[in-house]
Each structure stands twice: as C-alpha cells, then as structure tokens.
Image (cartoon, helix red, strand yellow):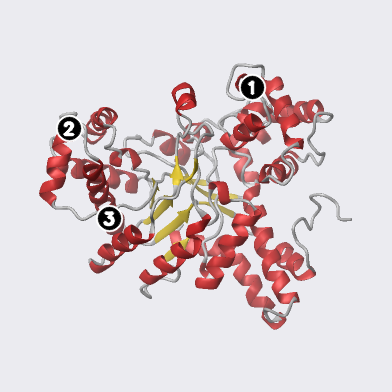
Amino acid sequence: MKTFLDSNFLLQTETAQKLYHAHASKMPIIDYHCHLSPQQIADNHKFADLTEIWLGGDHYKWRVMRANGVPEEYVTGDKPAYEKFEKWAETLQYAMRNPLYHWTHLELSRIFGVDKVLNPATAREIYDECTAKLQTAEFRAQAIMERMHVEVVCTTDDPVDNLEYHAAIRKSNLKTKVLPAWRPDKAMAIENVAAYNDYLTKLEAVADITILNFKDLLNALRKRHDFFASQGCCLSDHGLSTFYATPYTDAEIETIFLKARMKKELTAEETDKFRSAMLYELALMDAQSNWVQQFHIGATRNNNARMFKKLGPDTGYDAIGDAEVATPLARFLSRLDEEGALAKSIFYNLNPRDNELMVSTIYSFNDGTVPGKMQYGSGWWFLDQIHGMEKQINVLSDLGLLSRFVGMLTDSRSFLSYPRHEYFRRILCNILGREVENGMLPASELPFLGKMVEDISYNNAKQYFGF
C-alpha cells in the first residue's frame, strides 16, 4: 500500500517518477491567468488566520460545504473564523475523490509544511499551527509567491481599472513579475442597459472621452488598451457563454448602441449583433498590439436567482453550459484570419462535450508563423481535476501537439493554489511515463520527453507570451 501524498504521489511508474523529479519539479511557475487581488499583492497582505486565506472567496469550497449540509452562516456568513474552518474540516472527510481533497493536503504540505490529514480530530491543531505561521513575514502574500518559485503572475483586470497596485508592485522588491491582463467583459455586457450605461460613465472618466456613439466607445477602449500595454499587459481574457459571430452592418451597430445609450431594452438579436461586433473589434486591438487573447467558453453563471440577489456573482452558483460553439467559433476565427488579424489565442472550454470540437476547429487556423499559435487551454474550472486534465491532455495529443502546450494555470483567487501546477505536472508525467513503460513511446527518447515536460511546465509559456 502506498502512502498518501508521498514523493511519488500520482506517479505510478518508474519512468513517470524520473520525468517528474528530474524535470518537472525544478521548473518555475508561470501563472498566466488568475484572479488574485493586486492590492493584496502590493500591500504584501498579512492574513489574519487560516480561514481568511483558505475559505475567503473560494467558491469551490463553498459549493461542497453547502452540499454537505453546512448552513450559509458558516460559509459566507459572520460566524467566527474557527467555526467556519471547523465546518470545512468536517466537510473535507466527505469530499474524498473530489479534487479539493488533494488540493487541500497539497497546500498544507507544500506551503505550511503540515503533512497531517485534515479531519475533525486534527482541525484545531492544524488551524492553530497554520494561523501562527501566517502571522510571520514568511507567510505574507509576497513571500508565499516567492517561496513557491512563481516567476510571473497575470491578474484579471477591467479596462476601467487604474492599475495603481501594479505600479506599486513594480516599485517593490517582489521578485515575482505581476502583470495586468485585460478583461473587457463588462464592455460587451449590453444586455442590461442600466448597468451598461453606468459602466460607460466609468469608462468615460478613466479614458477622458465622452462616449456618444459606437466609434467613441472603441476610441475609449483603444486608449485604455494602450494604457494597459504601457503597464506591461500582453494578454486579454474573455469570459463568454459562447462565441459571437452574427453578421451585422456598421449602421446596425450604431443604431443598437444609441438605443442602449437611451436606456431602451434591446432584442436578443440586437444584443447578439452587438456582442459580435465588440468581440471582433477587441480581437483587432489584441492583434495590433501583438497580445495573446484568451477565451473561456461555456459557463452558465448565477443560476440560483435567490442566492445571486443575496450574495452576488462568483459565490458558487455557476455551472457548465451547452450553448452552440462550433459554427460561431469557426466564423469568428475565419473572419480574423482572412484579414490577417488573428492573434495568438488560447481556448478553454467548460463543457467536456466540446473537447474534440474545440481542438479540431482552432487547429484549422494555425498558420505556420508561431509554434502552437492556436492553443487548447488546460482543463478549466469544473474540469481542472485528474479526469478533466487527462481528457484535455489526451484530446490535445490525439488531435494536435501536446509538446507545444503552454501548460497549467491556477485561475484562482487564493495565494495557496500554486500546488495545482504540481498536480498538473504529476498527471502529465504519469501519462508519459506509463506510455513509455507500455511500449507506446520509445524509451530511447527519454531525453526529449524530459525536455518536453520542462517545456510544457514552463519554457513554452515563457516563449509564447514573451515574458
């Protein structure tokens, strides 16, 4: 019987162990998509206790706590910190085979040096030990990033953000490079005309442009895009239910925009045409700036109306969607390709139904100019567990070039999530090692396989993004 979470965790063959320990484990981390708070990084935030750093904002944990019958006051409510943690420890026993079980213990081990199993009997001891460590300089936000060998972090930032905390970080002694990433979702969200007009007021203020028509909107966004570039940004990111590529005319978009500006409700067709125009124009900006664009596709958000009214977004009530992807994706990419304006792109799908669809479609638009120009992104959100990662790796291998993959990211709001990179690397090495030992890959190519592991873990991302 193997020991839980030992040095060969998830590495089921000798070759897998060699690939991981000699190659994957030594590579630094490039976390090119996350939701960390730039302010907490700039302030070198000191966490009050283990509950704050572990349960604060973590809707993964909130979902399973609710599923375990934990009342909301212990999840997002005002119960004392330890009582919330105690409920999490009680829940974790029931979360065996959920990725949270592995992530929890990896984070305890790799960041806090705690190798005990968390359960109700150990909860008080673990809480006290970790909370005490969090009071020291070695466990403040910046120190955690440096200790985990994080070389680059890209946060998620709205066009109206002033990026003041990124500027402060650059002036600090932090060794980790922290860059903004452009997330213009609110600039496309015209379906709620009241909220959209409120957003345009903010955009007008930061861009110093009066937005009276669609051309003004694009000018304001381009000005902010240029500002983000001046602050080191080289990535965009879009959270979409699907791609938008409905045919439209410039006159139609002007009419739709003016209608929304007058706070008149739009039809579904008008909304779709506007989104199509915006997605195209934003892609042009990325291509002109030589940025990488990322597309996260397939979530249905805020499904529980009652809890959305109570808690707002990003609180654990999102799910996998099933919108049509193939036709609008191909139409969107083909238009950009025809115009010579298709930037390097990474695509993440949330519905595993779309795995093969996504790879086969995006690979129709590789053009020989950049290795791995069209990237099939790592298993995302509900799919960033063992089975989801294995499926992503296998589909990319079957239909594309795994060796050119830019690897893992955390997509997390937590400073404790960096062991997810280790988790991914172990899964990758286990797949490759098993196939060598099964005669499916040649043992004579182990030197190249070792390099391939290093590339996927770090080198490919560094070259692809130009960090």
Point out the residue furthest to the right here. Answer: 1
Q: Where residue 317 sits: x, y (%)?
A: 51, 34
Which mark is drawn over residue 261? 2
Q: Tell me the crowding category of disc 2: few under 14, some 14 to 19, or many 20 or more residues within 10 angstroms, Cα based.
A: many
Q: Amino acid at mark 3?
A: Ala
N-terminal-most mark, 3 or 2: 3
Q: Amino acid at mark 1?
A: Pro
N-terminal-most mark, 3 or 1: 1
Residue in the image at 60% along x and 70% along y: 452
Which type of secondary structure does the marked residue at label 1 adopt?
loop
Query: From the image, which quarter does the N terminus lie in?
Result: bottom right
Q: Which of the pair 61/27 is nearer the observer? A: 61
Q: What is the tally of numbered marks visible in this picture?
A: 3
Which type of secondary structure does the marked residue at label 2 adopt?
helix
Q: Amino acid at mark 2?
A: Arg
Q: For residue 12, which quarter of the picture?
A: bottom right
N-terminal-most mark, 1 or 2: 1
**Badge 3 is on which residue?**
245
> Is any atom of residue 25 visible in this view?
no
Q: CA distance from mark 1 to mark 2?
A: 42 Å
**Badge 1 is on which residue?**
71
